[in-house]
C-alpha cells in the first residue's frame, strides 16, 4: 500500500493544514506513549543501543521498560512487553528508504518493491505467503500490510497470539523481506496491473492539489517529483533489475529497525532476533542518503492557487525557515511547549470564529512542522465556506497578525495549560491500558532519532517543571518570532 503522505514531524496538537494533515511521522513532543510497567533495568545512556536510537546525548529519561538494541550488522530493534490486547504481538519493520531514493527511471519503484515483498522470496515461493498466513490464522490486509512514503517503508504484522510458533513465523517473514526477496521478472510483470490500478484509484483532485502545493511551496526540493505512487511509464516499463537496484542498495541492516510490542518475554524475543537476523548482510554497495534539495528562504512572498470543481475551498499562509537540528532535551521540550501553547491559542480563536453563523470559515488552525530536517514550516489556514475564500484569507491573516502584534491573554494561556495537564493526567492513569499497536507505531517514529521515547510519568513531570514559567509574555514571544522576517 502506498502512503500518500508527507513525512513532516509536527509539534502542534491542533488541527492542521491540508498540507500538514498528510503528516505521518508524528513525533509526540511530550511523550504521550505509555507502557505496562515491568521490571527492567534502566537503559545505559552510553550503550551502543542508546547511541543507535539517539538518546545517548539527551537529558530526557527514556522509558526503562523498553529493551533497545542494535546488532553488530547495524540493525536496530526495540522490544516492549505490553498486555493490551492480551496474548497478542505487534511486529513492525521499518526500512529507511522511500520514494526520495528513486532515480528518474525508478519513480514508483520503492512502492513496487513493497508489493514484491509479498510475491516470492528464497524461503517463501510466490503465492505461498498468503497461504502461510492463513494457515496461521492471519488475514492479509487486516493482520499484515505495508506502507511506503517519501522516506520510509514499513512492514506490519499483527499476531493474534504470542505462541513461539507464530512469533517464529513472523520473524521468519520479516527476515525474508529484509534480505531474501527474489524479485522475479515474471512476478514483476504480473504485479504491474495491480499497481497501475492502485495508481489510477489515487489519481484524484486531492493528489493533484497536493502535487501543485508541494511544487509551489517547496521549489528547489525533489518532493513534488517523488510522489510515492510514481509514474505510469515507470510502472509499466521498468525492468525487475531497477527494482532490485533499490532493494540491494537500501534494504540493508544498517537501515532497518524491528519493533515488537506484545505479551511476551523480551529476553526470549531478543534471543530470537539475534539468531534470526545476526547473519544478515547487505548485498553490494550501500545506497547514499538521497539529496532532497532545499527551500529558497530569501524567495519573495508569492501566491498560488489550485482550482477543481470537486475541491473544498481552503486557504493557508505558510512561512519557511531553515531547520535547526538539535537533540531532544528538557530545554528543547520546554521551548516547544511554549510554542505549542501559542499555536493552540490561535487555533482556538479560529475555532470560535468558525462557530459564528456569519463566519466565512468552517474550521481554522495554526501549526508548526519540520520537513525531513530541511525546513521548519509555520502555517495558518482555514477551510472556507463555498465562495468565501477571499474573506477567509483576510480573516486568517488578521488573526495571525493579531497574535504577533498583541500576543495572548493570561486566561488563554491558563486554558491551554489546563487542557494539557488533564491530558497528561489521563495518560498516566491509563498507562497499563495503552494498545500495543499504538505503542509500536510510536516506536517506529522514534527510530528516526528525533525524540526520546518516554513514559507518561516522565512527560507529566517535564510539563509540571515548565508550566509555572509560562505566562502571557513568555508564550506570546515565540509566536511573534515564528513569523518574523
Image (tube, grey):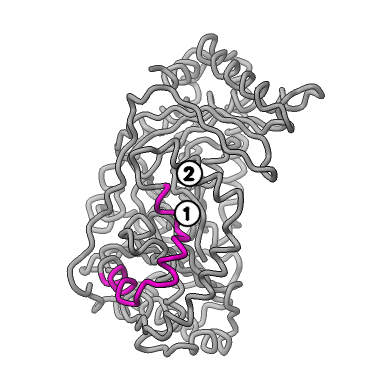
Q: Residue at x 52, y 58 (%)?
A: 36
**Viewer-nearest residue: 180 or 56:** 180
Can residue 229 be spotted in the picture? yes
Which residue is tagged 2?
28
Question: In the structure shown, which secondary structural element does the residue marked by tag 2 occupy?
Answer: loop
Q: Is residue 463 left or right of residue 204?
A: left
Q: Position of residue 375 (x, y in %)?
A: 36, 36
Q: Position of residue 285 (x, y in %)?
A: 17, 68
Q: Position of residue 159 (x, y in %)?
A: 54, 75
Are discs 1 and 2 less than 8 Å apart at CB? yes
**Viewer-nearest residue: 394 or 337:** 394
User: In this rendering, is residue 291 above or below 219?
Assistant: below
Q: Is residue 35 left or right of residue 300?
A: right
Question: Dot 1, how many residues are within 10 Å of its Cα: few (below 14), some (14-19), or many (20+)?
Answer: many
Which span is picked out in magenta?
224-248
**Viewer-nearest residue: 125 or 388:** 388
Amino acid at each position: 500500500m502506498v502512503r500518500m503522505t508527507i513525512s513532516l514531524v509536527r509539534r502542534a496538537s491542533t488541527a492542521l493544514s491540508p498540507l500538514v494533515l498528510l503528516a505521518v511521522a508524528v513525533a509526540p513532543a511530550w511523550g504521550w506513549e505509555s507502557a505496562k510497567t515491568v521490571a527492567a533495568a534502566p537503559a545505559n545512556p552510553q550503550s551502543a543501543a542508546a547511541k543507535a536510537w539517539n538518546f545517548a546525548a539527551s537529558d530526557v529519561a527514556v522509558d526503562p521498560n523498553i529493551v533497545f538494541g542494535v546488532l553488530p550488522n547495524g540493525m536496530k530493534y526495540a522490544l516492549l512487553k505490553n498486555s493490551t490486547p492480551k496474548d497478542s504481538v505487534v511486529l513492525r519493520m521499518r526500512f529507511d528508504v522511500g520514494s526520495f531514493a528513486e532515480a528518474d527511471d525508478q519513480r514508483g519503484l520503492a512502492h513496487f518493491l513493497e508489493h514484491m515483498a509479498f510475491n516470492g522470496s528464497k524461503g517463501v515461493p510466490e503465492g505461498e505467503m498468503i497461504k502461510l498466513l492463513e494457515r496461521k490464522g492471519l488475514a492479509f490486509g487486516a493482520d499484515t500490510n505495508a506502507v511506503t512514503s517519501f522516506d520510509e517503508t514499513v512492514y506490519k504484522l499483527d499476531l493474534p497470539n504470542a505462541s513461539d510458533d507464530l512469533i517464529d513465523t513472523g520473524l521468519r517473514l520479516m527476515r525474508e523481506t529484509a534480505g531474501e526477496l527474489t524479485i522475479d521478472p515474471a512476478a514483476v510483470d504480473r504485479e504491474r496491473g495491480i499497481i497501475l490500478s492502485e495508481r489510477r484509484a489515487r489519481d484524484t483532485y486531492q493528489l493533484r492539489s497536493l502535487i501543485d502545493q508541494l511544487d509551489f511551496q517547496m521549489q528547489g526540493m525533489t518532493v513534488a517529483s517523488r510522489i510515492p505512487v510514481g509514474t505510469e511509464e515507470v510502472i509499466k516499463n521498468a525492468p525487475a533489475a531497477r527494482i532490485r537496484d533499490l532493494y540491494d542498495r537500501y534494504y540493508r541492516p544498517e537501515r532497518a529497525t524491528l519493533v515488537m510490542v506484545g505479551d511476551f518475554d523480551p529476553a526470549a524475543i531478543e534471543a530470537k532476533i539475534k539468531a534470526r537476523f545476526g547473519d544478515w548482510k547487505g548485498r553490494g554497495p550501500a545506497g547514499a542518503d538521497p539529496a532532497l534539495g532545499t527551500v529558497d528562504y530569501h524567495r519573495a512572498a508569492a501566491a498560488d492557487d489550485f482550482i477543481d470543481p470537486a475541491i473544498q475551498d481552503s486557504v493557508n499562509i505558510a512561512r519557511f525557515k531553515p531547520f535547526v537540528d538539535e537533540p531532544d532535551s528538557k530545554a528543547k521540550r520546554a521551548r516547544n511547549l511554549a510554542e505549542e501553547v501559542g499555536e493552540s491559542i490561535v487555533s482556538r480563536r479560529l475555532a470560535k470564529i468558525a462557530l459564528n453563523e456569519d463566519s466565512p470559515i468552517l474550521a481554522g488552525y495554526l501549526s508548526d512542522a519540520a520537513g525531513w530536517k530541511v525546513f521548519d514550516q509555520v502555517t495558518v489556514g482555514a477551510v472556507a465556506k463555498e465562495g468565501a475564500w477571499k474573506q477567509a484569507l483576510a480573516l486568517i491573516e488578521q488573526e495571525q497578525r493579531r497574535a504577533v502584534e498583541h500576543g495572548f491573554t493570561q486566561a488563554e494561556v491558563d486554558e491551554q495549560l489546563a487542557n494539557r495537564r488533564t491530558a497528561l493526567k489521563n495518560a498516566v492513569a491509563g498507562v497499563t491500558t495503552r494498545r500495543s499497536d499504538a505503542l509500536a507505531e510510536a516506536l517506529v517514529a522514534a527510530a528516526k532519532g528525533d525524540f526520546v521515547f518516554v513514559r507518561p510519568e516522565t512527560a507529566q513531570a517535564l510539563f509540571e517543571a515548565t508550566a509555572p514559567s509560562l505566562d502571557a509574555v513568555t508564550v506570546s514571544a515565540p509566536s511573534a518570532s515564528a513569523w518574523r522576517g
